[in-house]
Amino acid sequence: MNRTVQINGREIGEGCPPYVIAELSANHNGDIDRALRIIQAAKNAGADAIKLQTYRADTITIDHDSEDFQVHGGLWDGRTLFELYQWAQMPWEWHEPLFARARELGITIFSSPFDATAVDLLEQLGTPAYKIASFEIIDLPLIRRVASTGKPLIMSTGMATLQEVDAAIAAAREAGCANPIVLRCVSGYPAPAAEYNLKTMVDMAQRFGVLTGLSDHTISNVTALASVALGGCVIEKHVTLDRAGGGPDDSFSLEPAELASLVADAHTAWAALGKVSYERQSSEQDNAKFRRSLYVVKDLCKGELITAEHVRSIRPGFGLPPDCIGAIVGRHAQIDALRGSPVSWQLVGDVPGRR
């Protein structure tokens, strides 16, 4: 089945170029001008969409310093969850100007809501789609709330078991989203490519009958391009202006030139998949004449016995096919033939088309 989903008029599916989402996330680093410049950079790079994250520290956790709320190791070592999200959050009052700027530039903008109040805000702004983050894929009430809006829904599956993915897809469908897009994801920051197991993406498409893609936290673009070759329809990548910017997500994000390369290379990879075809391609037409064929490589006189010294399979391709050599060698020449002449059936006195 050739299933498709539309976001803001852009069709997403097997027969469409990959849909590339530039994830702004926390890369605003507390500066709305930086956020605006990232939106511009995403547009310039050719991304299809820019995505935000809509939460406040107090809508995603509580201010508490017990062990349960501590982050140990990794990029955010030593912070409490509340401190991390207070650092990373995007002020809600920024959403309206960011949505306005994206629309002015002609790039689709939507967001990941982390609770129902975020959904309410995004509905007020007329978001054309939603994304459920990996950490929220087990929040089935949130998925149902988002699905009930009737907007296209993308879900990441980092950390999720098969049963949890199944439950999330079922919740989305039961609440009104018949065709959620499901992204393979590894919730490591950064994540090693070897842990992505992209064949799981293929299995999800077959098992659940969904469009799939990749939420990619690796440093390079290789994994994302491989996902396109396996049928992925969506690529999501974190984007920043400067990987050394010092913000919560900068260090594992693409810079603008890398995003532009991803967009171009993903489109090339998709175009290269093409269709099943055994036809000669247009770029090959001029070279077909240089394929091998039978040629006279030593002068022949009429009546002379033709041997392997007289006829060989060489390039170019204006003579008989190489497999005809058995019908030529061992017979007598019926005409004179100079070295460098293409072999035809006339050499042995046969009429073209009789064989």
Image (cartoon, helix red, strand yellow):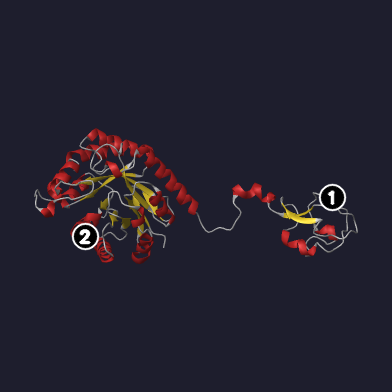
Task: Tell me, yes or no, whether the two marked residues, 1 and 2, touch with CB atoms within 8 Å.
Answer: no
Q: Callout 2, which amino acid?
A: Ile
Identify which residue, 96 or 288, lies in the foreground: 288
Tell me where residue 62 appears, x and y as whole percent.
10, 50
Q: Which SS class for mark 2? A: loop
Which residue lies under the disc numbered 1?
Answer: 338
Please state if 40 lies on the left or on the right of 313 as rendered.
left
Please state if 214 lies on the left or on the right of 269 as rendered.
left
Q: Quadrant of the C terminus?
A: bottom right
Q: Is residue 46 visible?
A: no
Q: Callout 1, which amino acid?
A: Leu
Mark sitting on residue 138: 2
Please state if 126 lies on the left or on the right of 268 as rendered.
left
Above or below: residue 323 compared with residue 219: below
Tell me where residue 129 appears, x and y as whole percent.
28, 50
Q: Quadrant of the N terminus?
A: bottom left
Tell me where residue 305 appears, x and y as whole percent.
87, 61
Frontmost of labels 1 and 2 is 1
Please state if 310 lies on the left or on the right of 82 as rendered.
right
Q: Please give the name of the residue rendered at 21% of the width and 40% of the height, measured from the top-left corner.
A: 95
Give the farthest residue toward the right. Answer: 303
